[in-house]
Structure formats: C-alpha cells, structure tokens
Image (tube, rainbow, N blue to C red):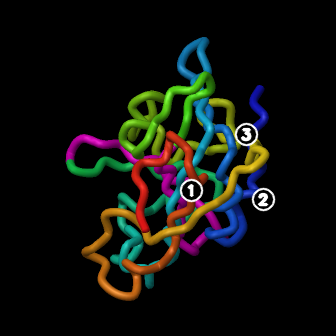
Amino acid sequence: MSNALSRDFYARPTLTVARDLLGAILCHRRGDAVLKARIVEVEAYISERDQACHARAGRTARTAVMYGPPGHAYVYLVYGMHEMLNVVTEREGSPAAVLVRGAVRLGGEPLPGPGRLTRALGIDRALDAVDLCSDRLWIEAGGLGRGERIARSPRIGIDYAGSPWVEKPWRLYVEGSVGVSRPRA
C-alpha cells in the first residue's frame, strides 16, 4: 500500500498545490519495483482563460481528465516523442493542472525536463487519468530541505500563448537543484 497524498491535497488552488509539490516524492509501481524521484520543478496551468493551458479550447477528449476530479494524472504526448505528466488540481469542472517538469531520482540521478523524467520513471499515456491516490502512480509527502528555497519564473516554451500569459511567474522550482530543467531569469 502506498502513502499517497490525499484527494484533498489536490483539491486546492493550483499555485498552492504547485508549491507544495516541490520536495514531494513521485512514485510509479512497475511490476515488483517502485521507481521514485523527488519533484524539484513544476509549472501551473489554470483554467480555460490561461492561453498556455490545454483547456483554452474547452473540453476535448484529450483534456477531459482536467475537468474531472482532482488528484488524477493527465499524461499527453508533445512533439510526437515526449510524454508529459501533469497533476489535476482544483475542483471538478475547473480545468487546471500542474506539469511536473523536473526531479531527482532517489539516489541522486537528475531528471531535468519533463520528457526525461517520464522516460526514466516509465510514465506514459497508458497512465492518463490514473488516480494519484492509488498504488500504481502516486505522490508522497516530502518537503524542502534545510536551506532550500523556492524560485519562480515564467513558464517555459509557451511563447504561443502571448501576453500576459507568457509572463505569468507560474514556474516554481527548488533553486540550485540539479533536477531543474534550465535556469530562466
């Protein structure tokens, strides 16, 4: 049995969940093994108004999970090659999610970038809509270590969204962590 975070953890404002995911442990059960990594970088995507959010076009087959109950995985393919893991947040019917951008495997291997992270942990679209309060894919409580600080910046790779969305400081990361995908002023 896992020590998964409760549904109530995810049923909060997206930026609060994003901040509280930093330092948490992402876990994926594959057969008898459980792969684990400490989350060190995330990005928030909030509502149909957010022009960088997949929900900007409304509910589709791809984004339906974002409209469902909080605490589910939203996994999609980007550029035809990278699986991206998002955590659905807020209340049902309010499409929002946190992209897990970077992590450090327990044991020290840095996993900067969402594609590298999902590849290393074996996370793919077969896990789309999986309940994160289960024992298949889950997140355990963690936290920041002594002296660690949270930094914020605009999200990465969303130039298409235009102003003001491209400037929103909705990327949060553990400053100085080797698992952060890339620095940004």
Q: 142 or 56: nearer the eye?
A: 142
Q: Secondary structure at mark 3?
A: strand
Residue marked by disc 3:
140
Could you tell me which residue is drawn at 59 percent across and 33 percent down? 37
> From which residue to which does the magenta span run?
80-102
Q: CA distance from mark 2 to mark 3?
A: 13 Å
First-in-chain label (1 vs 2)? 2
Q: Is 135 placed above or below 145 here?
A: above
Residue type, label 1: Tyr
First-in-chain label (2 vs 3)? 2
Q: Residues within 10 Å of mark 1 (few under 14, many from 20)?
A: many
Mark sitting on residue 8: 2
Residue type, label 3: Glu
Could you tell me which residue is drawn at 36 percent across and 60 percent down? 61
First-in-chain label (1 vs 3)? 3
Disc nearest the viewer among 1 and 2? 1
| Relative image position of residue 86 (x, y in whole percent) | 50, 53
Could you tell me which residue is drawn at 56 percent across and 44 percent down? 177
In which quadrant will I find the N terminus?
top right
| Relative image position of residue 185 (x, y in whole percent) | 43, 68
* Tag 2 and tag 3, C-beta contact below 8 Å: no
Q: Secondary structure at mark 2?
A: helix
Q: Is residue 85 magenta?
A: yes
Q: Residues within 10 Å of mark 2 (few under 14, many from 20)?
A: few
Residue marked by disc 1:
173
